Amino acid sequence: MCGIAGILDVTGPVARASLEDMIGRLHHRGPDGRGFFAEGPIGLAHARLSIIDLAGGDQPIHNEDRSVQVVFNGEIFNHLELRQALEQAGHRFYTRSDTEVIVHLYEEHGERFVDHLNGQFAIALWDARRQRLVLARDRTGIRPLFYHWAGRRLAFASEVKALMALPDMPRRLSLPGLGETFTYWSPLPGNTVFEGIQALPPGHLMVIDEGGPATARLERYWDWDFDPERIESHRSAGDLADELRELLIDAVRLQLRADVPVGAYLSGGLDSSIITSLIKHFTDTPLRTFSLTFEDEEFDESAHQQDMAAYLGTEHTALRCKRSDIATHFPRTVWHTESPIVRTAPAPMMMLAGSVREAGFKVVLTGEGADEVFGGYDLFKEASVRRFMARRPASAMRPALMDRLYPYLRHSPAASRVLAQRFFSEGAEHLGQAHFAHGPRWTTTRRLWQFFAPEVRQSLAGGDHLAAIAPHLPASIGQWATLNQDQYVEAHTLMSGYLLSSQGDRPAMAHSLEGRFPFLDHRVIEFANRLPPRYKLMGLTEKYLLKRSMTGLLPESIRTRTKQPYRAPDSASFFENGHPVDYVADLFSPARLNDAGYFDPKAVGKLFEKCRAGRAIGFADNMAFVGILSTMLLHEQFIQGKACS
């Protein structure tokens, strides 16, 4: 895992100093070395976290005649198989690095080299003969890649802070980007919260040929596909469960490839328990596990973690997280997420990554992605109940169905019959739309808009957050099963924009730790996309086939456990006996709010006092508090230039 940066400037040579400034901002992503390539209009820079071929894998990497150069952030898990095929085709390698297969694949297949990669990656490849730059991002958006056009110059990097190293980079937050974040939890694919800066969407290539921006092509090379013609309805659950288990075993084996020790997260839930169990039972990798625990019982899963660690006999380390720890680590968390966040959950994840790195590990496997791939979220069950209620409003089963949702929430929307009726009936008019499942979540989050300053609200007025998602959906989505529609929207909003970024790549790479996600192996996704929906969500039992595939490999208490999503204390973390943490009091002061200009000081003041008194209720209050705080920190760090170390 690494950091990359570069400049394509068709008007003149690229200054080495600019590349050094950019890559210097990414030292945390690659503390083990730096490399540069500058020739004519192109400049490439690389900060290395050495994991494969420790002695010989320095980048940029080139082909035999040095006409193709590449810098790369990520891992190619099938590099050994690719290398063998390429050597048989006559290609000569000078390293053992997984990076080198990229240049030779490009020689063989051109831009479609990405089709052959099993991995997580952000790639910048320069073809000197064609004067062509190719940027590529992995299928699900695990690794980030941002870019900025300034006339005929393109700058790109793994993180926004590297782009900000360039002196002419605009330093303004994007109001549309803030509006999207305060609706979908992150900007929509391709967008960011910074004016003039774009993100390469997951599963996309950008190709710029000689001539610069006029030749730029943005192309999707892969996407989630739930074609009804490919659903394997004729196969038995037992047969599919056996195939899934073998596929997951292979995905785990591939992702354990490294020349450094590999650890695993163990949350106590089903997904991380599956990964650790497969490591234990089907590989010879020593199993070392790590977890988070909380002083608040509402969030703590330590009992389940201990049960699983004892079952596997793993050497296990648990990191205890207090509310005060979240407040302490939150500013640095925002510095690395580079986006407002509406929950504090990334802060404990960054703490955990730090403890894993201190234990001597550079790589960790996690269970992220299983809920999106196999239908594990409460949102999917909630949507099923809402669809049932919309179609059968007089059914006597409604109360029993609502009682089965959100048992872990202190302020569950199902706790009150009146509130539940209102909540589950919300958005019924959108029953036939692909965004139906997500309407309540987006509406709840969008209530944060009430805290925007009047001029910000006026700037954003007229936008339809439901219509805005339509351009990001495939034309055929209406032909898919409703659960598959829900999965697609989830994978292209919350997962890629927030979970894999603010809770994935960013907190881990803040400590030079590479996270790997076997459930997001594209072969696993493509297999799951062919499953009949009933094998994902059977009634209100989530991840049915995944659980069945693990029979005999997990304790029954873990295998059949109901999903409890990872959460952390929110607004309460920033107050001690009614007294706010110093930096929080400062950022929420009317003077600071007025100076930044994003929020209405009067409305925010009322929220602040409500949270200070411990009267924040449910998601809306807590998301608003955390969202405002993180936006103010982002403004201070990136717009005012007060970087957080």
Image (tube, rainbow, N blue to C red):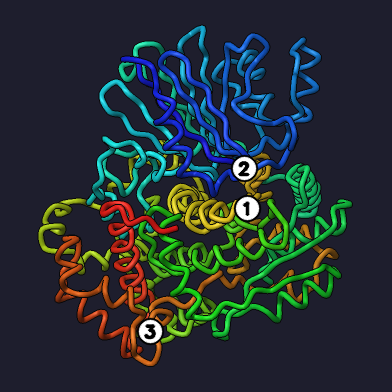
Instruction: Name the residue: 66% across, 58% down.
Output: 357
Q: Nearer the viewer, residue 437 or 319?
A: 319
Q: Residues within 10 Å of mark 1 (few under 14, many from 20)?
A: many
Residue of label 2: 1
Instruction: Name the residue: 89% across, 52% down.
Output: 284
The circle on residue 575 is: 3
Q: Residues within 10 Å of mark 2 (few under 14, many from 20)?
A: many
Which amino acid type is shown beneath numbered disc 1? Leu
Mark 1 and mark 3: Cα distance apart in space: 31 Å
**232 sits to left or right of 333:** right
Mark 2 and mark 1: Cα distance apart in space: 8 Å
| Earlier residue among tags 2 and 1 | 2
| Earlier residue among tags 1 and 3 | 1
- Tell me, yes or no, whether the two marked residues, 2 and 1, touch with CB atoms within 8 Å: yes
The residue furthest bottom is 577
Q: Secondary structure at mark 1?
A: loop
Mark 3 and mark 2: Cα distance apart in space: 37 Å
The circle on residue 513 is: 1
Which amino acid type is shown beneath numbered disc 2? Met
- Tell me, yes or no, whether the two marked residues, 3 and 2, touch with CB atoms within 8 Å: no
The circle on residue 619 is: none
Instruction: Name the residue: 41% across, 82% down.
Output: 572
